[in-house]
């Protein structure tokens, strides 16, 4: 792939705003593994190699198992590996990432309301929106994978 712009250098104000969202995510109630599962699953859907590389490594640093990472793309067939909360996070991630298909369904939202309070649901939505934005930045600018 050809080199493209580096948004951090070309439009520092926009990049700073994105980093503000990332800073916000450091303060939310989700734990590190939950956040990384969201980031990995959205990045799988979006095909973002840069983010997949980064977030699978980060998840492993936080103690995530290789098996759960390997099977994340097929989590519905491996439900026993993921908690009920994680299953809802992953369903929300898929539905919000693929928002044009059917949106965040009532079924998934109702399950989220059973497990999370309104503030946590807002945090989850913001985490999903943020990684989707990062995926789009990395893919559209051909951000190189760290070697």
Image (cartoon, rainbow, N blue to C red):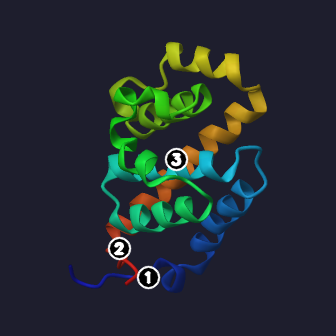
Q: What residue is shown at x 48% (from left), y 34% (from top)?
A: 81
What is the quadrant of residue 1 in the picture?
Answer: bottom left
Q: CA–CA distance between discs 3 and 1?
A: 26 Å
Which badge, 3 or 1, comes first in the chain's sequence?
A: 1
Residue 83, placed above or below residue 132: above
**To which residue does mark 1 refer?**
6
Q: CA–CA distance between discs 2 and 3?
A: 24 Å
Q: Nearer the viewer, residue 40 or 15?
A: 40
Mark 1, residues whose alpha carbon is within 10 Å: few (<14), some, or many (≥20)? some
Q: What residue is shown at x 65% (from left), y 61% (from top)?
A: 22
Mark 2, residues whose alpha carbon is within 10 Å: few (<14), some, or many (≥20)? some
The location of residue 28, given as percent across then percent down, is 76, 48
**To which residue does mark 3 refer?**
37
The location of residue 37, given as percent across then percent down, is 52, 47
In the drawing, what numbered circle is on residue 128? none
Residue 42, placed above or below residue 87: below
The location of residue 61, given as percent across then percent down, is 59, 65
Q: What residue is shown at x 41% (from left), y 48% (from top)?
A: 67
Image quadrant where one finds the C terminus: bottom left
Residue 142, placed above or below residue 78: below
Q: Residues at badges 1 and 2 in contact (C-beta under 8 Å)?
A: yes
Residue 64, placed above or below residue 77: below
The location of residue 104, given as percent across then percent down, is 49, 25
Residue 10 shows in this picture? yes
**To which residue does mark 2 refer?**
141
Mark 3, residues whose alpha carbon is within 10 Å: few (<14), some, or many (≥20)? many
**Count of numbered circles in the view:** 3
Q: Secondary structure at mark 2?
A: loop
Q: Is residue 145 left or right of residue 125?
A: left
What is the quadrant of residue 103 in the picture?
Answer: top left
Q: Is residue 100 left or right of residue 113?
A: left
């Amino acid at each position: 792939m050809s080199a493209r712009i580096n948004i951090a250098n070309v439009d520092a104000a926009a990049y700073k705003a994105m980093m503000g969202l990332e800073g916000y995510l450091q303060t939310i109630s989700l734990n590190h593994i939950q956040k990384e599962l969201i980031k990995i699953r959205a990045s799988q859907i979006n095909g973002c190699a840069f983010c997949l590389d980064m977030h699978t490594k980060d998840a492993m640093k936080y103690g995530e198992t290789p098996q759960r990472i390997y099977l994340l793309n097929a989590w519905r067939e491996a439900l026993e590996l993921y908690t009920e909360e994680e299953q809802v996070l992953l369903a929300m991630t898929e539905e919000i990432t693929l928002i044009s298909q059917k949106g965040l369904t009532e079924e998934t939202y109702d399950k989220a309301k059973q497990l999370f309070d309104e503030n946590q649901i807002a945090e989850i939505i913001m985490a999903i929106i943020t990684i989707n934005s990062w995926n789009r930045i990395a893919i559209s600018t051909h951000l190189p994978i760290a070697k």
